[in-house]
Image: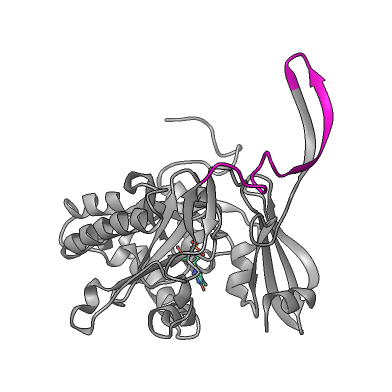
């Protein structure tokens, strides 16, 4: 089964979401009678100073070099240009750029097939709400949910990367020894990265230890480990990309709620603001902030903290009680939920 033949058999059902800001569209459809979600994202422009060459080691992890002119760079690649209007010193028009499947592809396409209801709901447009997740809500609602989400089927892609050599040729860094499993981790390009443009560099670091499901499981005992992890990430990645990205140009962060409950951190070029937040839900917390907070949170760390973030109505937690909690919280705070009820402050 390759991507091209699967996409060829994709039967369109409806648009799940489209975002003119991120230039992403997600469609629901089916392939061979099973649900499929296809997402397309227009790729970013290639400037003439960065270009991709195969790495020396022969692996397909791209390495970037500076160079002057490339026929696929934005200006050189203009094959057609039509002015729409001009006014005084302002001109605007439309253009067609030279495209090439390797050097300058038009879009990155992701396919999930067969897609579960979790996947479909995750991409579907939804109403969002701010909620305070208290430690009690975590214990009563989130913990049982996490247990259900940690099936070997759902975690298969993670275990494939850690133990089965999946995506091996793209791995940027791997550290693992049986003696020191707790320090082991692997860094590789995230599924969200086109792998071409370093401005939109997006990597994910997945740890070998499996006792940490999410931010909630972190306590002060993990602080030194996270400091080491942060240091390694910020050292290794600039080296790997020949300092076309510097240690202080990487945004290293965690998601809560994550989509997958096996500890991992996101690593993104700071030139790509907002990335990792495109779903509009959950919270993004910088690894540096986590390390800092563990210095003064009590011995139970994040387990005792109330976490405020955005939750979508399609998230399972919404039905499992978060919806009711949001109402209760507003009532408790004395905040009216409709114009009739808001008679002013007292
Ligand atoms: P998350 O914070 O749990 O969820 O991050 P998010 O999707 O809301 O960000 C999981 C990260 O793993 C995401 O950035 C995904 O794009 C990435 N990811 C998911 N899968 C299934 C794969 C995969 O098979 N390979 C790679 N390389 N990355 C993946």
Q: Which residue shows up at 44% across the image and 45% down it?
A: 270
Q: Which residues are magenta?
A: 67-90
Relative to 222, is 94 above or below? Answer: above
Image quarter (top left, top right, bottom left or bottom right) of the N terminus: bottom right
How does the figure colour the protein chain or chains?
A: one colour
Relative to 291, is 21 above or below? Answer: above
Image quarter (top left, top right, bottom left or bottom right) of the C terminus: top left
Q: Position of residue 272 (x, y in %)?
A: 50, 46
Q: Quadrant of residue 328?
A: bottom left
Horizontal side of 188 relative to 33 (left or right) equals left
Q: Position of residue 68 (x, y in %)?
A: 55, 41
Horizontal side of 296 relative to 28 (left or right) equals left
Q: Is residue 277 visible?
A: no
Q: Which residue shows up at 36% across the image and 66% down it?
A: 138
Q: Which residue shows up at 69% across the image and 67% down it?
A: 38
Could you say which is closer to the camera, residue 80 or residue 186? 80
């Amino acid at each position: 089964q390759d991507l091209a033949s699967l996409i060829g058999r994709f039967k369109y059902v409806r648009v799940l979401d489209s975002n003119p800001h991120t230039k992403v569209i997600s469609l629901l459809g089916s392939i061979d009678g099973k649900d499929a979600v296809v997402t397309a994202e227009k790729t970013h422009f290639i400037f003439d100073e960065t270009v991709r060459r195969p790495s020396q080691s022969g692996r397909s992890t791209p390495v970037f070099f500076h160079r002057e002119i490339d026929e696929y760079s934005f200006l050189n690649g203009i094959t057609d240009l039509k002015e729409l209007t001009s006014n005084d010193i302002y001109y605007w028009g439309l253009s067609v750029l030279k495209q090439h499947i390797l050097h300058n592809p038009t879009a990155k396409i992701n396919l999930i097939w067969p897609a579960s209801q979790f996947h479909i709901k995750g991409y579907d447009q939804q109403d969002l709400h701010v909620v305070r997740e208290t430690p009690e809500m975590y214990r009563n609602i989130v913990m049982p949910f996490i247990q259900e989400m940690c099936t070997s089927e759902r975690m298969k892609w993670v275990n494939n990367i850690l133990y089965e050599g999946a995506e091996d040729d793209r791995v940027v860094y791997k550290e693992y020894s049986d003696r020191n499993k707790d320090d082991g981790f692997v860094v590789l390009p995230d599924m969200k990265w086109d792998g071409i443009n370093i401005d939109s560099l997006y990597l994910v670091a997945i740890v070998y230890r499996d006792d940490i499901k999410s931010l909630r499981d972190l306590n002060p005992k993990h602080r030194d480990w996270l400091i080491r992890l942060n240091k390694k990430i910020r050292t290794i990645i600039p080296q790997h990309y020949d300092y076309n990205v510097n240690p202080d140009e990487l945004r290293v962060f965690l998601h809560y709620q994550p989509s997958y409950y096996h500890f991992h951190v996101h690593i993104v070029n700071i030139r790509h603001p907002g990335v990792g937040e495109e779903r509009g839900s959950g919270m993004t917390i910088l690894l540096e902030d986590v390390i800092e907070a563990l210095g003064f949170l009590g011995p139970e760390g994040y387990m005792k903290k109330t976490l405020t973030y955005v939750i979508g109505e399609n998230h399972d937690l919404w039905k499992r009680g978060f919806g009711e909690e949001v109402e209760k919280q507003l009532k408790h705070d004395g905040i009216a939920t409709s114009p009739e009820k808001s008679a002013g402050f007292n």
